[in-house]
Image: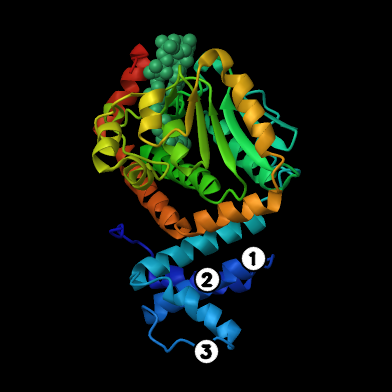
C-alpha cells in the first residue's frame, strides 16, 4: 500500500517513547512486541541484523516482529508507533464503562439499546424516526458499548438497527452547531471522533456481526468491511454517497472495499455513490448472506445462537490472527482518511451539500 502523508515529528515520537514508560497498565506481551518492532523500524529502518537461533526464543520473537515490518518507512513506523501509544494512553486513562465521564450520557440513552442473551451482546441503534442517523452522542455510546462488550461474558457481538432502516449514516445536523473555534475546530473534533470510533471496530477482539435489517448509508456501510460477518435482509441497500456530500471515504473503506470487491466496483460505490442492492453487495463480497425479509430475524438469530455455542476462546483467537495480519495497515488508513475528511469538511463542496440538506432536507 502506498504510504499516506505522514505528519509525526521526531518530537512527537520522542514524547511517545517517554509516554510508554508512564502507562498505568501493562499493555501485554503482544503489544510490547509491536512497540519494540515499530521502535526499531522507526530508529534503524528495516531489520538488518542476523536472525537469532531457534533456541534464542525471546530474541528470535523480537527479530520476527521487526522483520515482519518489511520495508515500512521510518516515517510510517514512527507514525504507527505514536498512534499506538496514543491509543494505549487513551484506554489506560479513559474511564471504564461502569464509571462514565460526567459529561457523557451512557448507552442507557434510548437511542442505543444494549442487551446480552445466549452469549450474544446486541447493540441496537434505536432512533427509527430519523432512520437511525448517528448523533455525536451515539458515536460515543457505540464506542462505550463496544468497549463493554469486549470485556463482558458474551461470545459474539451484533450491531443492528430498529425500525425499517439499519442506519442512515452520520446525522447531518451534527454539523449544524459550529463551536466557538469555528469550522476548523468542528472539523478537528469530527476527525478525532471519527478516528476513535473506527479504531474501536479495527481493534474489537471478538467476532463482530452486522445484522443489516434495512437500508444502510454512509459510515454504517463503510465500517462493514471491518465486521467479521454481515447478514442482510433482501430489503437492505448499501449506499455511500460521499461525492454527493462533498466528502471522502472513511471507515477504512478506501482500503477494505477495493480488497473485498476489486478496485473498479469499489470506485463505483465510493466515488460515484452507486447504491447496491443486498444481492449485489453479497455478490461483491461485502455481505456474507442475504435472507428473505419475512424470515430474516428468525433465521439470522437461530444461526447466531448456534455459533455462540462454539468455543469462545478459539473463536476470539481465530479472529485475532486474521485481524493481526493487517491491523497496523488499517490504523494507518484510518488516520489518513480522517486527515483528508478533516479538510473536506472545511470545503465549499461539503458545506454546500450539508446546508442543502439542512435547509431543504434534500434526499439522496
Ligand atoms: C463536532 C463535529 C461533528 C462531526 C461528527 C463527525 C462524525 C463522523 C462522521 C463520519 C462521516 C460519515 C459520513 C456519512 O455517513 S455520509 C451519509 C450521511 N447520510 C445521508 O446523507 C442521508 C441523509 N438522509 C436521506 O437522504 C434520507 O433521509 C434517507 C434516504 C436516508 C431516507 O429517506 P426517507 O424519505 O425514507 O425518510 P426521511 O428523509 O423522511 O427521513 C426521516 C427523518 O429522518 C431524518 N434523517 C434521515 N437521515 C438523516 C441523516 N443522515 N441526518 C439527519 N437526519 C436524517 C430526515 O431528515 C427525516 O427527518 P424529519 O422527519 O424531521 O423530516
- Residue name at image x 55 percent, y 47 percent: 200
Residue 18, placed above or below residue 105: below
Tag 2–tag 3 contact (CB < 8 Å): no
Q: Is tag 3's residue or tag 1's residue first in the polypeptide sequence? A: 1
Marks 3 and 1 close (CB-CB < 8 Å): no
Label drawn at residue 27:
1
Vertical position of residue 221 compared to residue 328: above or below = above
Q: Quadrant of the N terminus?
A: bottom left
- Marks 2 and 1: CB-CB under 8 Å? yes
Disc nearer the start of the sequence (2/3):
2
Residue marked by disc 3: 53
Residue 280 in the image, given as x and y percentages of width and height: 35, 27
Q: Write down the residue under mark 2.
A: 35
Q: CA distance from mark 3 to mark 1?
A: 27 Å
The percent position of residue 285, horizontal first and vertical second, equals 39, 37
Q: Name the residue nearer the viewer: 247 or 155.
A: 155
How many neighbours does mark 3 have within 10 angstroms: few (below 14), some (14-19), or many (20 or more)? Answer: few
Q: As displayed, is residue 285 above or below residue 21? A: above
Please rate how many residues cluster around mark 2, counting C-alpha atoms within 10 Å: few if below 14, some from 14 to 19, many from 20. many
Q: Is mark 2 within 8 Å of ligand 1?
A: no
**Can residue 164 be seen by looking at this rendering?**
no
Name the residue located 38 percent from the left edge and 64 percent from the top edge: 8
Amino acid at each position: 500500500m502506498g504510504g499516506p502523508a505522514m505528519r509525526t515529528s521526531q518530537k512527537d515520537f520522542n514524547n511517545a517513547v517517554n509516554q510508554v514508560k508512564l502507562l498505568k497498565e501493562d499493555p501485554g506481551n503482544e503489544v510490547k512486541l509491536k512497540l519494540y518492532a515499530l521502535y526499531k523500524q522507526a530508529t534503524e529502518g528495516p531489520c538488518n541484523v542476523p536472525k537469532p537461533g531457534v533456541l534464542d526464543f525471546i530474541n528470535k520473537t523480537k527479530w520476527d516482529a521487526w522483520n515482519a515490518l518489511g520495508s515500512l518507512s521510518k516515517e510510517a513506523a514512527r507514525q504507527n508507533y505514536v498512534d499506538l501509544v496514543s491509543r494505549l494512553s487513551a484506554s489506560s486513562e479513559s474511564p471504564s464503562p461502569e464509571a462514565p465521564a460526567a459529561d457523557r450520557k451512557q448507552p442507557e440513552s434510548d437511542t442505543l439499546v444494549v442487551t446480552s442473551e445466549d452469549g450474544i451482546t446486541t447493540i441496537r441503534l434505536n432512533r427509527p424516526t430519523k432512520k437511525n442517523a448517528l448523533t455525536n452522542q451515539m458515536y460515543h455510546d457505540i464506542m462505550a458499548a463496544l468497549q463493554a462488550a469486549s470485556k463482558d461474558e458474551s461470545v459474539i457481538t451484533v450491531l443492528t438497527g430498529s425500525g425499517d432502516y439499519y442506519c442512515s449514516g452520520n446525522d447531518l445536523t451534527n454539523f449544524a452547531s459550529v463551536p466557538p473555534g469555528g469550522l476548523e475546530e468542528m472539523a478537528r473534533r469530527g476527525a478525532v471522533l471519527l478516528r476513535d470510533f473506527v479504531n474501536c471496530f479495527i481493534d474489537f477482539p471478538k467476532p463482530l456481526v452486522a445484522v443489516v435489517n434495512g437500508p444502510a448509508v454512509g459510515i454504517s456501510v463503510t465500517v462493514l468491511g471491518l465486521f467479521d460477518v454481515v447478514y442482510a435482509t433482501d430489503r437492505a441497500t448499501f449506499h455511500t454517497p460521499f461525492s454527493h456530500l462533498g466528502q471522502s471515504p472513511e471507515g477504512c473503506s478506501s482500503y477494505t472495499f477495493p480488497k473485498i470487491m476489486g478496485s473498479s466496483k469499489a470506485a463505483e460505490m465510493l466515488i460515484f455513490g452507486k447504491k447496491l442492492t443486498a444481492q449485489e453487495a453479497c455478490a461483491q463480497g461485502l455481505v456474507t448472506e442475504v435472507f428473505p425479509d419475512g424470515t430474516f430475524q428468525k433465521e439470522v438469530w437461530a444461526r447466531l445462537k448456534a455459533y455462540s455455542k462454539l468455543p469462545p476462546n478459539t473463536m476470539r483467537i481465530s479472529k485475532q490472527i486474521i485481524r493481526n495480519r493487517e491491523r497496523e495497515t488499517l490504523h494507518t488508513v484510518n488516520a489518513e482518511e480522517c486527515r483528508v475528511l478533516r479538510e473536506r469538511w472545511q470545503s465549499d463542496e461539503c458545506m454546500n451539500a450539508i446546508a442543502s440538506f439542512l435547509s431543504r432536507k434534500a434526499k439522496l
